[in-house]
Image (cartoon, rainbow, N blue to C red):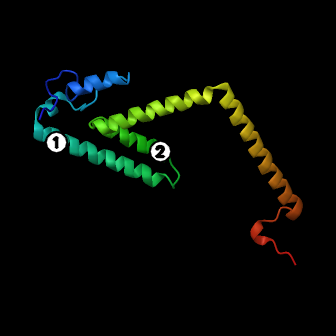
Amino acid sequence: MPTGADDGGGGSGGEGAAEAGADGGGRPLGSRAPRFIRRSRPLHLSWQVAVFLVGLAVVALGVVMLPLPGPGWVVIFLGMGIWATEFVWAQLALRWTRRKVAEAAQKALDPKVRRRNLTLTAIGVAVIAALGGWYLWKYGLVMPWKIHED
């Protein structure tokens, strides 16, 4: 099985270069390990295991941060980026994510969508303000768990 040591492009074979041009996105797919590591199959396998474990630890930390204070999603994507240095599936997942984020950003910049979002935000703020005003009119500055009606 080829390790991609002699392809000269840093990828893991010819399919990586063809795949990179298919979606118009940058680098060829495949391992970005140094050439001397890719030359030796056992060393490359050890490298892949180490990259996988480091990426797994970072992704696990991100998952733990989701309910806790901290940048959980940022850390998860950082772990995916670590995996993408070595694994084609992670590279494809990150390319898909980048493409979807770019599409969402373009859609958010559309004037009709911006107008709709601003309108919905204004309606939401008005509803929350009305509910807050009703609560203050009905109960004053008393917390809900201290309300005792006779």
Q: Is residue 76 left or right of residue 112?
A: left
Q: In the picture shown, does residue 137 fall above or below 128?
A: below
- Whichever of labels 2 and 1 marks the residue nearer the N terminus, that label is 1
Displayed quadrant of residue 80: top left
Between the C-alphas of marks 2 and 1, the distance is 28 Å
Query: What's under tag 1, amino acid-wise?
Result: Leu
Looking at the image, residue 14 sits to the left or right of residue 23; the answer is: left
77, 117: nearer the viewer? 117
The answer to whether 146 is drawn above or below residue 100 in the figure is below
Residue position for label 1: 45
| Quadrant for the C terminus in the image | bottom right
Residue at 17 percent of width and 23 percent of height:
7
In this view, the residue in front, 8 or 78, is 8
Q: Position of residue 108 (x, y in %)?
A: 61, 30
The crowd level at tag 2 (other Cα within 10 Å; few <14, some 14-19, many 20+) is some
Count every numbered label the image shows and give the total: 2
Indicate the position of residue 63 as horizontal and vertical percent values: 43, 52
Depicted 149 relative to depicted 102: above or below: below
Label 2, secondary structure: give it. helix
Task: Please give left or right for residue 44 compared with residue 116 in the image.
Answer: left
The x, y position of residue 39, in whole percent, is 12, 31
Tell me which amino acid carries mark 2: Trp
Check the image and name the residue furthest to the bottom.
Answer: 150
Q: State the residue position of label 2.
A: 73
